[in-house]
Image (spheres, helix red, strand yellow):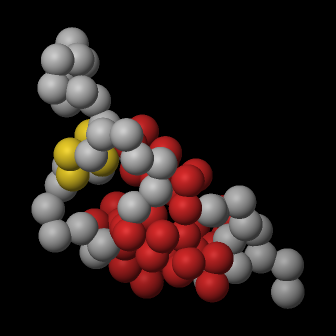
Amino acid sequence: VNKDNSNIYDVIEKEFGSFKNYLLGYFKEYPIKEVGKTTSSISDELSKDLFKRGMRFVGSTIIYSYLQAIGLINSHDDDCDVKL
């Protein structure tokens, strides 16, 4: 059976009600404030689970960047002008 990432995403949405619910299951609180990192224990765990489910191109650094992009990890310095 050839599963691509979009099919696996759909399965996760059905299992958890939404992909957001799946992601938030890895967070006690959010956004997490971290500066100068490229991976974390959360991105490590998410990456492993997504890979186990059959997703490809989901290494910890890619997942960490995704979590930054969607606002679950705030990596802006305190003096940065970007407001989240």
Residue farthest to the front, as pictured: 36
Above or below 84: residue 20: below
- On the image, the x and y values in percent for residue 42 come to 37, 68
- On the image, the x and y values in percent for residue 54 come to 70, 79
Residue farthest to the top, as pictured: 81
49 left or right, relative to 2 = left
Figure quadrant of the N terminus? bottom right
Above or below 44: residue 14: below
Q: Is residue 13 visible?
A: no
The residue under the point 46% across, 56% down is 39
Q: Nearer the viewer, residue 36 or 54?
A: 36
The residue under the point 71% across, 60% down is 57
Above or below 20: residue 70: above
The residue under the point 27% across, 46% down is 34
The residue under the point 62% across, 62% down is 59
Q: Nearer the viewer, residue 36 or 68?
A: 36
71 left or right, relative to 81 = right
- Total marks shown come to 0
Q: Nearer the viewer, residue 39 or 2?
A: 39
State the image quarter where residue 58 is shown.
bottom right
Figure quadrant of the C terminus? top left
Q: Nearer the viewer, residue 38 or 4?
A: 38
Above or below 34: residue 2: below
State the image quarter where residue 75 is shown.
top left
25 left or right, relative to 31 = right
Q: Is residue 55 visible?
A: yes
- On the image, the x and y values in percent for residue 2 come to 85, 78
